[in-house]
Amino acid sequence: MTDRSAAAAAGEHGERSDGRTREARGPAGRRGDSARKHEAGAGFFVRLTSRWGAGALPPLGALVVVIALWQFGLKLLGTPSYLFPKPTDVVRAASDNFPLLLQSVWTTAYESLLGFLLSIVFGVALAIVLATSRMIEKSVYPYAIVLQTIPIVAIAPIIVIWFGAGLNAVVVIAFLIGFFPMLSNTLIGLHSTDQNLRNLFYLYNAGKWQTMWRLRIPAALPYMAGGLKISASLSVVGSIVGEYVAGIGGGKGGLGFAITQAAIRVQTDYLFACGLSASLLGIAFFLAVQGLSRWMLSSWHESAMRIEN
């Protein structure tokens, strides 16, 4: 048998001329390829879940330990539930008043969202105006600092007189609390633009507003993202504070109104449920803004890019 015939025969039997077995490319081979692709996809899923799981396990473990100590510690001490309710009492109170609690959360979320959006619009707009002129910034920015340092509870009655008790006053209070972080972070970002890039725009005869829209605002986006995170959480706090002073009562009351009513009635378990709901609402606002910020910056800024090992 010639060498060519031997090679052909070896090919028919799935062997190579160097003695190693060659994988058959029939249906079984295609199934093998599919299996390998499936394993690769499963490996990616495992890596993804392990990455998230590794980050979530420590706080979840700490939460379980705290809840266990809270539950069994109060049970051993015999503390009355009206002084310090157990976690099971809090869950029961939230379940018994779930429709009312859900309505309160929704009302506060709506007020917080309106105040948050107003803080974005006015904070970013004023920061852009201040960044265009040092004279304007030196004239106006100190008053923004003064407004930030005034306790909101001190000016809340004035806001109620001007805007009336109810939704409008609560939204204004939420806006005032979330406004300054948005203003200051955006202004810092606008002033942090690379001077070499600004000189390059100047050499190409770019105008002041062209430089602002095409260079300074995009460069300030990471700073604005930080301001968004702070402002989002503070807007929830502002809404609840506003509800204490000018809140919406009745069936459409927010969490601030619900907390006030629970304290008057000494419903400590429901008071805890409202407080935890407010905390979860603030976390939800923060996580939503964080996800939006990462989506905006992930394709071009190193602060949001994933580092591959």
Image (cartoon, grey):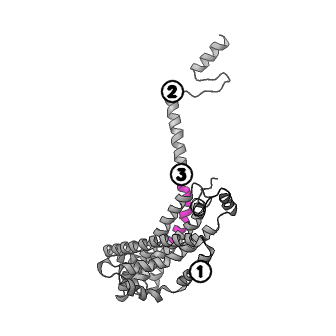
Q: Nearer the viewer, residue 18 or 291?
A: 291
Among all residues in the image, which is located at the extreme top?
1
**Residue 31 colored in magenta in the image:** no
Q: Nearer the viewer, residue 309 or 160?
A: 160
The amino acid marked with disc number 3 is Val
Q: Which residues are magenta?
A: 46-63
Among all residues in the image, which is located at the extreme right?
196
Residue 67: x %, y % from top left: 48, 74
Secondary structure predominantly adopted by residues drawn in magenta: helix
The amino acid marked with disc number 2 is Gly
Q: Nearer the viewer, residue 64 or 278?
A: 278
**Earlier residue among tags 3 and 2:** 2
Return the mark for residue 26: 2
Residue found at x 54% / y 39%: 36
**Residue 62 colored in magenta in the image:** yes
Residue 173: x %, y % from top left: 44, 80
Q: Is residue 256 left or right of residue 34?
A: left
Cα distance in 3D space between marks 3 and 1? 56 Å
Q: Is residue 308 above or below residue 96?
A: above
- Residue tagged by mark 1? 139
Quarter of the image that includes the N terminus? top right
Label 1, residues with CA under 10 Å away: few <14, some 14-19, many ≥20: few
- Residue tagged by mark 3? 46
Q: Are marks 3 and 2 in contact (CB under 8 Å)?
A: no
Residue 223: x %, y % from top left: 59, 67
Cα distance in 3D space between marks 2 and 1? 79 Å
